[in-house]
Amino acid sequence: MLNIDMEKYRQNAQDFLSELDKEYYLHYSGLKEDLNIANIYNRYGSLFSLDNFKAIIDLKKSACSDDEAKKLSYLTRFCGEGLIENCAKELVDKIGEQEAKAAIDIEGQQVSYRFSDVLLANEADKAKRDLIDDKRSSVTKNTLNPLLTQYWQAMHSQAKELGFSSYRKLFEFLKGQDFSILEDSMNNLLEQTEDIYTEHFGNLLKNELGISLPDSRRSDFAYLRRAAKYDRYFKKEILVSLFKDTLLGMGFDLDRQPNIILDVSERKNKSPRAFCATVKVPGEIYLVVMPKGGQDDFEAMFHEGGHAEHFANTKENLDFEFKFLGDNAVTEGYAFTLEHLMQSTMWLSGFLKMAPDMSKRFVYFSNISKLWFLRRYAAKLKYELMLHDGKGLAGRDEIYSQVLGDAVMMSYGPQDYLKDVDEGFYCTNYIRAWIFEAQLKDYMCRKFGYEWFAQKKAGSFLKEIWSYGQKYGPEEVLCQLDFRGLDISYLVENLKEQISTGP
């Protein structure tokens, strides 16, 4: 058996992740233009040696307890992911820098590529929206895709060098999952929701935008989801205070949580995609949102706020693996728990003072949007399983366009076939988190009532399950709550009921 100093390895791994998240925070918050991931990997490159990978796997086989086996399983994934990412660290920097520097011309005005996503979502004129979308696609195709091609080729090659037939097989091993089981569940969701999606999403698109489903494209959903007509309720000036007030109802005082640093400032190169940077768990958590107005701002704030509260309430004395590693479907599920308050008529009426008929219309809209995302992620999983099957990248752009377009019944351009892909099959974390959250919400509503968000007992319950970080996977948490594991029927039936009854 290969020798490895596990105490030293764990400390170095924690330091590495802290520096990495701080670098991501500085760059994607717009505070730092360059992205120096390569430098960090270079300093900690010894973490991700093949010898360490094999040694941790061997230690896991001889683990003397379930907890030790679980920690070593999480470390195996950490080392394996780092091992393949290390081979492309310079490309990660280049891709981030190119994306930050890229700009498009909109009616004679230079607009950053990242900020153009915000403009797209706020553009009411379809012709101009299509123009912005086309110019963004041109940047993706001509500037980003050459680098992304090199990146994914390197990832696929490295997976094979580790002895796996494909990137997919590597990550099924690292995650301990059979992705085909999840694919079957999502195919079932697509089948069960096809009619209700076609009818209700099609009608919503026609009524709100005057566009028929067959004539629509992905960028139309970006504007539809923007839902500008609800802006009078979702004012960005009240975003932070409303989030704080909601937390107070559950017994959490954000003003007395110095370990959560809020970043809601607008900056030129700030990523429009909200995120939470866990630099130190639970001591230094950054909650980053790009304010642009509307309900999607609130969803982003509450989603990332769910991550922040989860990690900020994690026990300090937990082992490193349970604080920084683990199954990310857990934290995504907790994030969805707060985000989906937007789908509660009671929360909308109580906190936003929406009239009952308006709150019903918004919940109807929100659930249709959620169904769009679920169908999109079902397609993303299907596509990524094909993309990472070990047979190369040729022709995958057209497959991407076809698979995604068929699921959401909108035109999907092929140029995003490498950009619209998350590393390490992260799409499976979102999918399992949606399922997990639907069951968790069912439990909380039965135990604390539909206004659980105003109950300090519910807050105490959340604080308790949050305190374990990611020691337990979604299946284990649900079993502790008397479920038999993940069950997609709660999610599907809830959506069908919410949408079919209408506003």
Image (spheres, grey):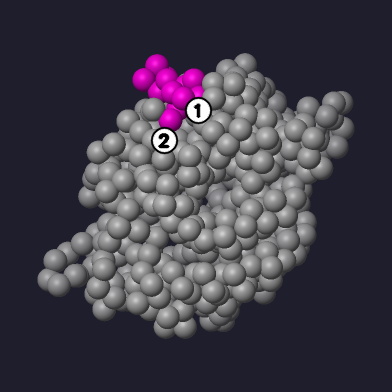
How many numbered tags mark residues here? Answer: 2
Instruction: Mark yes or no: residue 452 visible.
Output: yes
**Relative to 186, is 60 on the left or the right?**
right
Q: Position of residue 328 (x, y in %)?
A: 61, 42
Q: Which residue is mark 1?
A: 454
Q: Amino acid at mark 1?
A: Ala
The reply to whether callout 1 and callout 2 are in contact (CB within 8 Å) is yes
Identify the mark at residue 423; answer none if there is no mark.
none
Q: Is residue 110 above or below residue 484?
A: below
Q: Residue at x 69, y 68 (%)?
A: 192
- Where in the figure is residue 82, as x and y percent of width and height? 59, 45
Pair 1/2: label in front: 2
Q: Magenta segment range?
A: 246-259
Q: Quadrant of residue 109?
A: bottom left
- Lateral position of residue 78 relative to residue 413, left or right: right
| Viewer-nearest residue: 355 or 495 | 355
User: Few, some or many C-alpha atoms within 10 Å of disc 2 (few <14, some 14-19, many ≥20)?
Assistant: some
Q: Position of residue 340 (x, y in %)?
A: 51, 45
Distance Cα–Cα, label 1 vs label 2: 10 Å
What label does residue 350 carry, if any? 2
Q: Which sits in the foreground, 130 or 180?
A: 130
Query: Could you say which quadrant of the image residue 376 lies in?
Result: bottom right
Helix, strand or loop at label 2? It is helix
Q: Is residue 305 magenta?
A: no
Please provide percent x and percent y for residue 242: 36, 33
